[in-house]
């Protein structure tokens, strides 16, 4: 994997490493927490010649820098299998029961992220062998679900007072939809976004079930906008107030990167 000349991994402790795992992909980014000009992102699709874990092992072993001591190392898991648990009902010792209440057949280690304010936890799972391998071969990694990054971004996003807000993020042939009533989180879910008509129907159904107003409430869009233009054009006909989420990362990104990088990656770079 090619790295730009301004990243010197002889001093890896000066950089932050982020790894992002999707069901069929592996990507990573390296950036400097003190120099906004230093940022690099690279990704690859995992084929079917090897198993998922063997692909990840090969990538980590073939490119030995992943195991070097970085300033921080974060692994983001992209999946639709997660549930939100209010803090009052959350118990670290019961995360397996909390997760499998909604996902009976899912296997793997059950992990959790606390929201910035501590009001709820995102509970999700990761293949046990993948979790064990990365924990051993990365430098003190922390694990996160992609919705945790998005929730942190959208909770702090400046919104119109007195209006409900619906954030729709297009990513990885999926759609994550997160809704708020002013400052209160109402719902968060990730689903397949392959079929434009199904995607439009699901978003419209969420609005209907939450009793959002098509003329006064707000729809905020982010992610792979160009790839989902059909859906967005229909939504603009249904909902009066539609706008693109403005992102302000602490690193210097090109316009192309702003449009193509997954929103959860950019969200982790925002201050």
Image: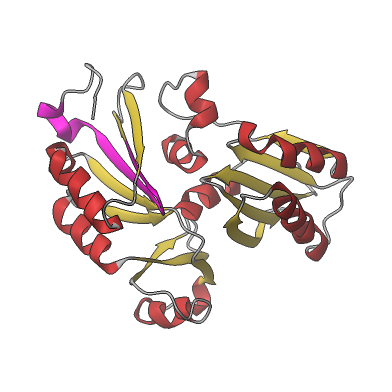
In depth, the one of 74 and 152 nearer the eye is 74
Q: Is residue 51 visible?
A: yes
Q: Which quadrant of the figure contains the N terminus?
A: top left
Residue 216 x %, y %: 87, 45
Residue furthest to the left in view is 10
Is 2 situated left or right of 62 in this image? Answer: right
Q: Residue at x 20, y 31 (%)?
A: 14
Residue 220 vertical position relative to residue 79 in the rendered view, above or below: above
Tell me if residue 106 comes above or below residue 142 in the rendering.
Answer: below
Q: Is residue 213 left or right of residue 62?
A: right
The location of residue 168, given as percent across then percent down, is 65, 47
**Where, by quadrant of the figure, is residue 5 drawn?**
top left
Instruction: Indicate the position of residue 242 as horizontal and vertical percent values.
Output: 77, 37
Magenta stretch holds residue 11: yes
Magenta range: 9-28
Residue located 51% across and 39% down the image? 263
Tell me where residue 253 appears, x and y as whole percent: 44, 22
| Residue 147 is covered by the magenta coloring | no
243 sits to left or right of 249: right
Q: Residue at x 21, y 63 (%)?
A: 132
Identify the residue shown where x is 31% and y is 22%. Answer: 38
């Amino acid at each position: 994997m090619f790295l730009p000349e301004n990243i010197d991994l002889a001093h890896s402790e000066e950089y932050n490493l982020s790894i992002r795992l999707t069901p069929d992909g592996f990507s990573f980014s390296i950036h400097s927490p003190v120099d906004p000009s230093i940022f690099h992102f690279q990704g690859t699709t995992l084929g079917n010649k090897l198993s998922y874990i063997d692909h990840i092992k090969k990538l980590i072993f073939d490119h030995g820098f992943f195991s070097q001591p970085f300033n921080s190392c974060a692994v983001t898991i992209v999946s639709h299998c997660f549930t939100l648990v209010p803090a009052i009902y959350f118990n670290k010792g019961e995360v397996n029961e909390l997760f499998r209440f909604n996902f009976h057949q899912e296997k793997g280690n059950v992990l959790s992220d606390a929201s910035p304010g501590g009001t709820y936890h995102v509970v999700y799972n990761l293949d046990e062998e993948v979790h064990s391998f990365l924990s051993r071969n990365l430098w003190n990694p922390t694990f996160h679900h992609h919705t945790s990054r998005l929730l942190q971004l959208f909770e702090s996003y400046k919104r119109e007072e007195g209006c409900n807000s619906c954030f729709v993020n297009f990513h990885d042939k999926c759609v994550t939809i997160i809704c708020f009533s002013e400052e209160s989180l109402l719902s968060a879910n990730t689903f397949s976004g392959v079929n434009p008509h199904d995607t439009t129907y699901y978003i419209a159904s969420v609005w209907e079930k939450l009793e959002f107003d098509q003329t006064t409430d707000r729809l905020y869009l982010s992610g792979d906008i160009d790839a989902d233009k059909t859906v967005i054009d229909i939504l603009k006909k249904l909902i009066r107030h539609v706008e693109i989420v403005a992102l302000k990362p602490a690193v210097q990104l090109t316009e192309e990167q702003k449009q193509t990088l997954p929103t959860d990656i950019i969200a982790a770079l925002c201050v």
